[in-house]
Image (spheres, rainbow, N blue to C red):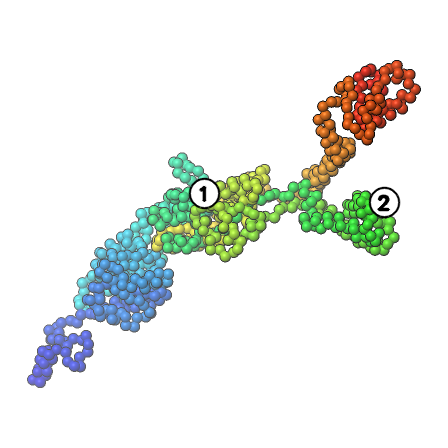
Amino acid sequence: MKLWLLISLSLFLHGEGALQKEHEKPQAVKWMDSFFGRRKEYDQSTSLVNLMKEVTRQFLVGCTPIILYDSFLEKSDTLLLEKLFTDFPIPYIHGQITRNYSINLKKIVKDTENTCVSYILFLADVMRCRDVIGEQNTNRVVIVARSSQWRVYEFLGSETARDFVNLLVIAQSEKILPIDQERPYILYTHRLYVDGIGSSAPMVLSSWMRNAFTKADVNLFPTKIQNGFSGHRFIISLASQPPFTIKRGRDENDDIQWDGIEVRLVGLLAETYNFTTDFREAKDVNILGSGKAVSREIASRKANLGLGGIYVTSDLVNLVDLSHAHSQDCASFVTLSSTALPRYRAIMGPFHWTVWLAVTLIYIFAIFPLALSDKLSLKYLIQKPEEMENMFWYVFGTFTNCFTFGGEASWSKSDKVTTRILVGFYWIFTIITTACYTGSIIAFVTLPIYPETVDTTKQLIEGHFQIGTLDKGGWQNMLVNSTDKYTKKIFKNMEFLPNVESGFKNITKAFFWPYAFLGSESELNYIVRNNFSSVNKRSVLHVSKECFVPYGVSMLFTLNSVYKEVLNNGLLRAVQSGFLIKLKHDVEWQMLRSSTGKLLQANVGGTMHLKVEDRALSLDDTQGMFLLLGAGFLLGGASLISEMVGGCVNFCKQKIRRLSTTSIESNPRSHDTLTPREKLNSIQYSIHSRLCSIPDNNSIQNTPDLDEEIDRIFNLDNLFGECNSEDTTTTEEIVSDNYY
């Protein structure tokens, strides 16, 4: 007995023995607690560690957990961390939270932004969680708070908690219990948008006691906002971008009325999730463009949603949150198109210009081999050039089947085998050619032929088009990084315009060089169909079928917004169920026009049936032949006039001769005296005076050889000129009759 007391006293005075386990009370302390009736304190940290491991196994397995703890926990309860990190179910990342609530592992956390992670926070003040990890709308967040129950309730109802969607708060119960009993841990979350102002409310999920949840199969991360937004008002920034967002004028309150595919889609989501909308036009749209103007409003948190046919680009990823692409749009060109080719082109239309060139060459040069085979020489064509004309008409008559040529040099009269073979094959060739020509004319006048439209960049280059696009909204840099050689040429000479209307104006007003405008395919189609005119052919436009740059169209949300996932899910359901297609058709039906120029909704009544009737050629179909006949009459009239004036060459010579004789001062018809002439072929003036003396009336009557004398006189007049004849009327008549 004395020995036992000595050993106990020695252990009590000298502390731990060599065989004592670490973190274990000395044996003397245990005896003292037992002697005085002291109860053993329950290890609450073990219960918390088991809870965290169970939560991790059930709800955090799919993502990498990031465990963050403040300095207070690290200094006061190191044993908790040691137990937690021992046999943790999955790989993890851990770090310390500094006194100013920043993270020492900023680089590691930043590298995991685009990966699936979850957060486990040990904080003394639960209200500072947003300062540590920021807003989290998708990642799961578990907060172990050493705050009071009232502080936790305050946090779950505050604006800070609304920035976390998947939130779980763990706090120890404040119920007073003996130290040797386990104090349960209460698990909280919150309900979002419980009223119209977007408030949140705390909600108890379950509690942890005796290494189990008090509620079986409890979901610690329930789906939020299942019942909608309780009439919450969303501010929506938008800009006009048909057909996605369309201005319809102003109402009685001078507010802009908006319509379009995206506006109706938001209306469908608002009805489904019970929220209201407040549409506000974005500022500086004319300067920045619709996309950039709306994204700036969303990035500055002046609005909750952004609409305007905005393309999904890398520039917007870091500024705002983007929804799933609900539509597909392209960068396309619009050019001036044409209706069916005019009917007068039926004469030339059947053949391509290369065919006409080949036929013309055969038409001309076929003369020489036929002539050579018949005469075995081409000298007679040089000696008698008129034979060339005869053969020309023979070939022409053969080709057109209008007439036959039966002259002396006709090849049809040739007895040579070579000539007959050539003529035979030439006839076969002409028969086939004329048959093709005739059949093509029939098809041309009965079926309209539309010209080839511009659908590729190669056609733009070959057509020498001037290219224009917008100077804002990213269009000016859209084709910079393209590796296509034709695209590079287009961008090199591209013109930048302030708006789409300027592009259409340049297209319709272009005269010498055609013009093309690069823009949104959906917008260009809307403008072309909405402003369709079947009267003015200059306004018939064509949007290229080739998609030069494909883009997805989406809506914008503020960065890390809690309502993003809810609206995204609704958007996907609308796309998958076909509601978006219906909205597009509704917009086309109510706002776009058909090929008749009327609104689509105006085409009501019965089902449209095609009228089947005989197709008779009209005057418009046959105008080409009349134009050709008119051209022939014009050429014939010009030839007739030329023959009447003695041919073009003789007419020109007479004109030159008259101009040269008007410079002579004396005119024999207007002077009494004779006009002196120069010496010509040794004939002197005296002879001319003798011959040109005109007798009086008596002498004329008495002269038997008067006609011979007059003839002789006027034959010499070709050399010496005319005499002045103003003596008597009888003499003038006689002279005039013989002269003319």
Specify whether residue 733 is in view. no
Tell me the amino acid under the disc marked 1.
Pro
Mark sitting on residue 607:
none
Give the percent coordinates (x, y) of residue 423.
Answer: 81, 52
What residue is shown at x 30% (from left), y 57% (from top)? 134
Residue lying furthest right in this view? 704
Of residues 571 and 217, the one drawn nearer to the viewer in this rendering: 571
Residue 498 has which mark? 1
Q: Position of 607 compared to 326: left or right?
A: right
**Residue contact between numbered discs 2 and 1, judged by CB atoms under 8 Å:** no
Q: How many marks?
A: 2
Left/right placement of residue 139 relative to residue 699 reads: left
Q: Residue furthest left?
A: 2
Query: Is residue 429 placed above or below 687 in the rendered structure?
Result: below
Label 2 vs 1, first from the N-terminus: 2
Amino acid type, callout 2: Gly
Estimate the x, y position of residue 128 in percent, counting from the top left.
25, 57
- The residue drawn where x is 82% and y is 46% is 383
Vertical side of 9 occupied by 393: above or below: above
Whether residue 489 appears in this view of the structure is yes
Q: Position of residue 211 (x, y in %)?
A: 27, 69
Quadrant in the picture for residue 535: top right
- Residue in the image at 33% along x and 61% along y: 110
Q: CA distance from mark 2 to mark 1?
A: 72 Å
Task: Please tell me whether mark 1 sits on a helix, a strand or a loop.
Answer: loop
On residue 407, which mark appears?
A: 2
Q: Position of residue 584 (x, y in %)?
A: 49, 47
Q: Residues within 10 Å of mark 2 (few under 14, many from 20)?
A: few
